[in-house]
Amino acid sequence: MSKTKSIIKYIHPIAGTFATVLIALFFISTIVVEIIGNPASITSLKSLILYGVCFLIPASIAVGVSGFKIEKNIANTGILSKKAKRMKIIGPNGLLILLPCAIALDYLASQGDFGSVFITIQAIELIAGPVNLILMVLNMRDGLSLRKARRSK
């Protein structure tokens, strides 16, 4: 096994776990701050989430690129097909829905605008975020089962 292939097999699960944990933290912290927080804590959280996205995007890219490289070396299975289909939802959902939501919510919160537009965007984010989280967890589960199957051969 080349050194590059060896590194990629470590990057993929680490980046995937990191991205999944970030999404979970964003979701859980949003729920908590919306329930028990005040406008200042909501504003702080929205800003922190936007900064967190700066780590999430490279981690997501690393997962996608490393997954593609790993997949090239594995016989095509139904599991790989399922993972690929999920990625076709995860990527656009993150880029086209969650990222704009994070930017808009940070902007609105920084302006002290917690009205109907903020609430609507927050609701969209609270639906789209768990969708990505669930799909990412399913991909992790399937990746672990592929690894286990490869090791038992």
Image (cartoon, rainbow, N blue to C red):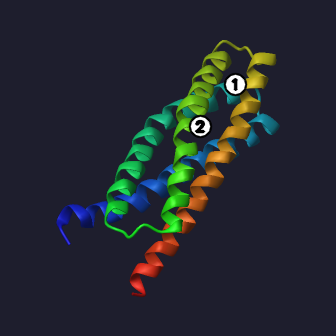
Residue 20: x, y in percent? 55, 52
- Which quarter shows the N terminus? bottom left
The answer to which of 100 and 84 lies nearer the viewer is: 84
Residue hosting label 1: 40
Q: Residues within 10 Å of mark 1 (few under 14, many from 20)?
A: few
Residue 145: x, y in percent? 52, 74
Numbered circle sitting on residue 93:
2
- Which quarter shows the C terminus? bottom left
Disc number lying in front (1 or 2):
2
Q: Up-down: is 59 above or below 111?
A: below
What residue occupies the far bottom of the structure in this picture?
152
Type of residue at label 1?
Ala
Label 1 sits on a secondary structure element that is helix
Label 2 sits on a secondary structure element that is helix
What residue lies at 49% left-to-right and 58% top-to-bottom? 17
Q: Quadrant of residue 11?
A: bottom left
Q: Is residue 39 visible?
A: yes
